[in-house]
Image (cartoon, rainbow, N blue to C red):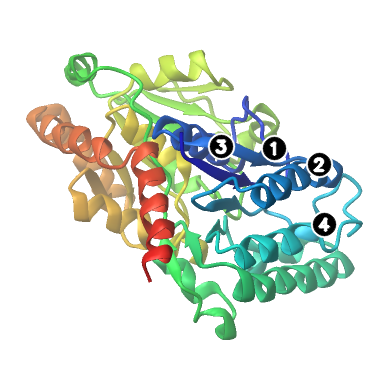
């Protein structure tokens, strides 16, 4: 069995529900599914030190690794300890240097660049300055050590500081699970049922327009799935009055799956934010994996994805969405066509396809 290295400067959470925790686990499982024996480097510094030492000894003893795939943290690499102090300043980047010296190509998925946006201004200014220094330090190290930087969408390149836009970037959006057989999805055509799953806190997730749609479409049933603590913050803002056509759930796992299976369309419509130009939420691909067409804002990377693959609808105004719902109710075949396109899309955009793409990119290094 061929071997590879999987690196994260944080612990893997196999029960994660948020995108930042779900994605690395899905990628790890996908690499294993395509036949790799994976040596993992993860956890806090002490754990990573032990794993790195073992891998270095393997390499010195002739063990061959095809490549190393790494996923960055939402925090700077050097600040990922529990106390957020840089007590392991050389650990990860020296390891990358060792791998590079032994001609083992490294690809790193850069999760997001949220720290470059105004939302980060909510952080106490001293912490913000310190964090930015270490974010820039990460980028400097990547420039010297990483063969390719994987990003959720190519639109993210413009958010990088100018001097780092010359990286070799490679698009690697989230993948779809294939959780149920196609014939089960086909039974969902009989009734329009709309679902949203994800964050609800402004400014990144300002869903006032979506809740206005819910209010103005009383004949359409909606389900909103979010974290309870977040909902408690915004519920009075989004729903000052009781709406009979919406149910709010705080579920995950099997119960979340049941909600997906009971729905026919995924809706996410929110106030425009420049972050939407490149953000690729895992929940969009999760919904597509369940065979659900997506309705979302026109423009932005998600809007273009939906339009380019004909796997849903995009619109600019609440009235356009209301009209669309009425059309679907009157002509169910409109939904049927989109679902057929989604079923084709998800087969070519699974997590296994993402792992195969990484392998292809990094194995190509040895041919150069």
Instruction: Kindly identify the residue that appears in the image at 7 percent across and 29 percent down.
Output: 333
Instruction: Kindly identify the residue that appears in the image at 85 percent across and 69 percent down.
Output: 130
Say left or right for 24 vs 137. Answer: left
Q: Secondary structure at mark 3?
A: strand
Q: CA distance from mark 1 to mark 3?
A: 41 Å
Q: Secondary structure at mark 4?
A: helix
Q: Position of residue 185 (x, y in %)?
A: 23, 19
Q: Secondary structure at mark 2?
A: helix
Q: Is residue 13 above or below residue 207?
A: above
- Please name which of the two marks, 2 or 1, marks the residue nearer to the observer: 2
Q: CA distance from mark 2 to mark 1?
A: 42 Å
Considering depth in this image, is 125 or 31 the residue closer to the camera? Answer: 31
Say left or right for 73 vs 170. Answer: right
Q: CA distance from mark 2 to mark 3?
A: 16 Å
Q: Position of residue 171 (x, y in %)?
A: 40, 60
Residue beneath disc 2: 50
N-terminal of the pair, mark 2 or mark 3, is: 3
Considering depth in this image, is 351 or 302 the residue closer to the camera? Answer: 351
Q: Secondary structure at mark 1?
A: helix
Residue beneath disc 1: 233
- Given the current orientation, which residue lies at the most extreme front position? 61
Q: Which mark is residue 38?
A: 3
Q: Residues within 10 Å of mark 4 (few under 14, many from 20)?
A: some
Q: Residues within 10 Å of mark 3 (few under 14, many from 20)?
A: some
Q: Is residue 171 above or below residue 283?
A: below
Q: Which mark is residue 79?
A: 4
N-terminal of the pair, mark 1 or mark 3, is: 3
- Please name which of the two marks, 1 or 3, marks the residue nearer to the observer: 3
- Residue 346 visible in image: yes
Q: CA distance from mark 2 to mark 4?
A: 19 Å
């Amino acid at each position: 069995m061929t071997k590879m290295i999987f690196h994260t400067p944080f612990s893997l959470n196999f029960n994660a529900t948020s995108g930042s925790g779900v994605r690395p686990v899905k990628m790890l499982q996908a690499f294993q599914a395509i036949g790799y024996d994976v040596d993992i480097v993860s956890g806090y510094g002490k754990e990573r030190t032990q794993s790195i030492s073992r891998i270095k000894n393997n390499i010195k003893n002739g063990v061959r690794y095809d490549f190393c795939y790494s996923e960055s943290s939402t925090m700077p690499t050097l600040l990922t300890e529990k106390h957020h102090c840089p007590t392991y300043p050389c650990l990860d980047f020296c390891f990358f240097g060792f791998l590079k010296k032994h001609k083992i190509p490294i690809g790193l998925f850069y999760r997001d660049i949220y720290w470059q946006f105004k939302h980060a201004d909510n952080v106490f200014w001293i912490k913000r300055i310190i964090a930015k220094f270490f974010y820039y330090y990460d980028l400097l190290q990547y420039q010297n050590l990483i063969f390719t930087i994987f990003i959720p969408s190519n639109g993210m390149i413009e958010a990088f500081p100018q001097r780092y836009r010359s990286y070799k970037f490679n698009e690697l959006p989230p993948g779809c699970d294939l959780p149920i057989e196609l014939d089960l999805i086909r039974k969902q055509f009989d009734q329009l049922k709309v679902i949203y799953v994800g964050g609800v806190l402004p400014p990144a997730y300002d869903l006032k327009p979506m809740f206005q749609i819910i209010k103005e479409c009383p004949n359409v049933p909606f389900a909103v799935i979010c974290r309870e603590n977040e909902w408690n913050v915004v519920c009075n803002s989004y729903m000052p009055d009781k709406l009979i056509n919406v149910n709010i759930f705080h579920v995950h796992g099997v119960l979340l799956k049941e909600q997906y299976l009971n729905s026919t369309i995924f809706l996410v419509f929110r106030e425009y934010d420049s972050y939407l130009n490149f953000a690729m939420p895992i929940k969009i691909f999760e919904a597509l994996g369940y065979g659900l067409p997506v309705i979302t804002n026109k423009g932005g990377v998600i809007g273009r994805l939906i339009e380019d693959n004909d796997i849903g609808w995009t619109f600019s105004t609440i009235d356009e969405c209301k009209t669309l719902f009425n059309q679907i109710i009157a002509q169910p075949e409109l939904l049927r066509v989109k679902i057929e396109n989604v079923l084709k899309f998800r087969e070519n955009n699974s997590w296994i396809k993402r792992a195969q793409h990484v392998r292809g990119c990094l194995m190509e290094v040895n041919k150069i």
